[in-house]
Image (tube, rainbow, N blue to C red):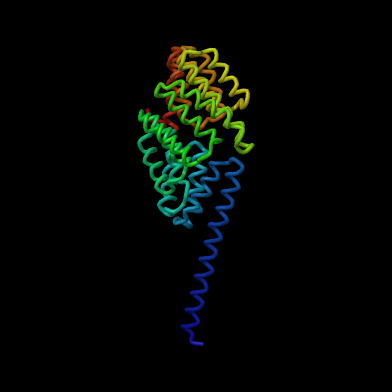
Amino acid sequence: MNGKFALALLAIAMLCVSALAQEDTANDRYKKAMELYLNGSYEDAIGVYNKAIEIDPQNSTLWRSKASALRDNGKFPEAIEAYGKAAELNPQEKGIWNIQGFLLSELGRYSEANEAYDKAIQDDPESAGAWGNKAETLDNMGRHDEAVRAYEKAIEILDNPTDSNSWAGKGYVLMKIGKYDDALKAYDKAIETASFGPSYMTEIASAKAWAGKGSVLNKMGHHDEALKAFDRALEISPDYSLALEWKGDALMDQGKYKDALIAYEKAIGTDTIFPKLWYKKGLALKALGSNSEADVAFAKAKELGYQE
């Protein structure tokens, strides 16, 4: 065999072995990172994902997995960037824009969140989840009539009278635009249909519906009934942070700042990574005259990426 030809074959073989070893190394690191992530060691998982990405920077799965670890570690701005990179590498991958929208919304970046949900809907016009999330964001932007239509679109897509979450979302927006009687009807429908879903979703759907009903009753001035509804929600799911948050909001509206602070702190004990809860805790502390403690809470919200 010609010496140069044999040498070329050997070089090709070595390149193949090297490529396979590199691929195995990236895969091994991915597996290690996943193990760390599932054990709740998010910071360590992020470090290992970074090493895997150094080896295979065009791998969208690695970027998306890193984004999930960043999200669960409370690093929402960095998670948004990583999800964006995953979407850039694999535009066909479903679900990324929906997650992006949620994170942007949690940071108070509602206009960007709305754009993300539009992209999610463009990818999948029949995604009831994307329409529902868009509705909540539109509500936060003050575009209440559009929000109601978006929730109705979600319900229409599902074509399922047993969809508790969409009824609850619609009730929330109707409450925001002052249509309290219609909102109560929607929440009652949400409570009625909560038990129709999968068993693992029944508890959270029921708690969310009762909490929402409590918010409407509070807006209507039925404060005692409202607190009973919140207590019912927390009886169903004691650690449900959204119920605690909404109870805190209602207590703030009633001027019960100390009780509101307790509710927000309990919510933070359940979901420490959500910046909006820290911001609301700051508002309660400020209302109580505890300005230095309020500043600490506001700083924590800002550290987590919250924008006023």
- Residue at 58%, 56% (x, y): give it: 28
Q: Quadrant of the C terminus?
A: top left
- Seen in the picture, residue 91 relative to 256 is either above or below; the reply is below
Residues 13 and 118: in front is: 118
**Quarter residue 80 falls in:** top left
Residues 217 and 260: in front is: 217
- Residue at 56%, 26% (x, y): give it: 269
Outermost residue on the bottom side: it is 1
The percent coordinates of residue 142 (x first, y second) are: 36, 28
Q: Is residue 300 visible?
A: no
**Quarter residue 147 falls in:** top left
The percent coordinates of residue 239 (x first, y second) are: 59, 27
Outermost residue on the right side: it is 199
Residues 222 and 155: in front is: 155
- Seen in the picture, residue 238 relative to 22 is either above or below; the reply is above
Residues 300 and 267: in front is: 267
The percent coordinates of residue 212 (x first, y second) are: 51, 24
Instruction: Give the number of callouts.
Output: 0
Q: Is residue 20 visible?
A: yes
The percent coordinates of residue 173 (x first, y second) are: 43, 28
- Residue at 56%, 60% (x, y): give it: 24
